[in-house]
Image (tube, grey):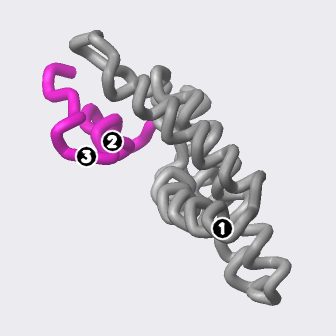
Amino acid sequence: AQRGILLVGNPFTMLAGLIALGWCIRAALRGRVDAAVFAALYLVQILFWALSSKPIQFYYHYLLPGTFLMACLALALDGLWNRGNRWLAGGGLAIAAGMFVHFYPIISAAKLCCGRSSFEYWMWLSSCTVTSL
């Protein structure tokens, strides 16, 4: 059996978090201090990450900025919930949970099905595939 552990974040929450970052910046301009703090923390951390002199970056280097991005997403979903868009906020949570369940085999080192190239299924991008297995 082929097994692997790949933890590169939840694709939905990482992409939705970028939209939420825009929401936080907009909310910050309207006076929300909590949104301003988390947006600023994310932007400062991503700047440090981008300007690092390391020639190779791994996803775990993004964990701290990603944490602040998730705070932005939580604030944005809370804003949707409080404005009465509960179906959209709940839908976002449901999609995030569904993506977690879908990616659980590669997060937990479970047996991967479908042959020698099964690990490639879990890569976000085709450039990340391992061809020498």
Q: Is residue 13 magenta?
A: no
Q: In the picture shown, does residue 30 fall above or below 86?
A: above
Q: Nearer the viewer, residue 108 or 39?
A: 39
Q: Residues within 10 Å of mark 1 (few under 14, many from 20)?
A: some
Q: Find disc 2 in the rendering and name its residue.
A: 123
* x and y percentages locating residue 12 in the rendered image: 51, 59
**Residue drawn where x is 28% and y is 10% of the image:** 54
Question: Pointers 3 and 2 in contact (CB under 8 A)?
Answer: yes
Residue extending furthest top? 54
**Dot label at residue 77:** none
Asked whether, in this view, residue 74 is left or right of residue 66, the answer is: right
Element marked by disc 1: helix
**Residue drawn where x is 73% and y is 64% of the image:** 31
Q: Nearer the viewer, mark 3 or mark 1?
A: 1
Q: Nearer the viewer, mark 2 or mark 1?
A: 1
**Residue drawn where x is 19% and y is 45% of the image:** 126
Asked whether, in this view, residue 51 is left or right of residue 112, the answer is: left
